[in-house]
Image (cartoon, rainbow, N blue to C red):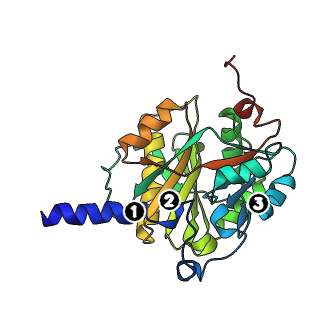
Amino acid sequence: MANRAAAFRERLKRFNTPSMRSWDRPPAWRTAGMKRNVALDCGWGRLIFGQTFADHESIIRLFQSEPEGRRDLAIYVPDHHVLVARAPDLLFVDPSYTYRLWLHADRIEPVRLSSRFLIRFLRDERDAEQVNRLYARCGMIPSPVETILRNQHTRVFSYFVAEDRLDNTVVGTIMGVDHREAFGDPDNGASFWCLAVDPLRQAKGLGRALISHLLDSYRARGRHYVDLSVLYDNRKAIRLYRSMGFRRIPVYVVKRKNALNRPFYKGGPKR
């Protein structure tokens, strides 16, 4: 009985984290040390942390300044639907799901990966250039090499790559963001973005190994959870995330209506 009560309290505690309650502003003492108006330059666009903004107008102005060819996104926005309603010609709610894994409670089995592949930190310009080639193969927006390298030399970003030892080619990559380092997150969380595996050289377990490596890194830092965003129809990726213990949460992403995002807000049947 005591174990059940403890489990219930743990579930309740998870649901009451500020990032899960976008309709409810946390008390001032919870956010006293939090940085304000945080938007990280990821190269492909800005990662806007909505909970660090005092009002929707500031977020709208950021989206209005989105550079051409980039894809800004806002996550953890208080009352995201109200934000979109205030700028319906500019913004839309992305058709994606957000998943979370609690690092202190959810353990995943060790990943078995061929010794042919090495998971390591992105190190230099050559690595960054290969990551961009990988992004291109996977239909993703490339990032300026200098932005990747600058970000990698901070505590906020962690870029990992999977290297094929046979020819020292980067065949997989993942980008982690430490929310605690980025803005003093009261939830003590992190997230990952831009998981990509070379479609021409996919190896069994490569994506899982990249995620696992990143999770271990944030667990060692004492982070509480890791979030991810995935398009609603990416069934293969969703199966992978769920098999690793990630569970869907009520967190949504807002993006700008632009040429890159047109397929996600125009509607109609897929072609």
Residue 73: x and y in percent read 70, 51
Q: Left or right: 147 with respect to 113?
A: right
Say which residue appears at 58% left-offset and 28% top-offset: 200
Q: Left or right: 142 with respect to 230?
A: right
The answer to whether 269 is drawn above or below residue 252 in the figure is above
Q: What's under tag 3, amino acid-wise?
A: Ile
Q: Which residue is mark 1?
A: 14
Locate the N terminus and report the quarter of the image it occupies. Answer: bottom left
Q: Earlier in the sequence, mark 1 or mark 2?
A: 1
Q: What's under tag 1, amino acid-wise?
A: Arg
Task: Assess disc 3: are there few (<14), some (14-19) or many (≥20) residues with their C-alpha within 10 Å of its C-alpha.
Answer: many
Task: Assess disc 1: are there few (<14), some (14-19) or many (≥20) residues with their C-alpha within 10 Å of its C-alpha.
Answer: some
On residue 59, which mark appears? 3
The residues bearing labels 1 and 3 have C-alpha atoms spaced at a distance of 27 Å
- Camera-nearest residue between 10 and 84: 84
Say which residue appears at 43% left-offset and 38% top-offset: 240
**Helix, strand or loop for disc 1:** helix
Q: Which residue is mark 2?
A: 20
Say which residue appears at 41% left-offset and 60% top-offset: 15
The residues bearing labels 1 and 2 have C-alpha atoms spaced at a distance of 8 Å
Residue 61: x and y in percent read 84, 59
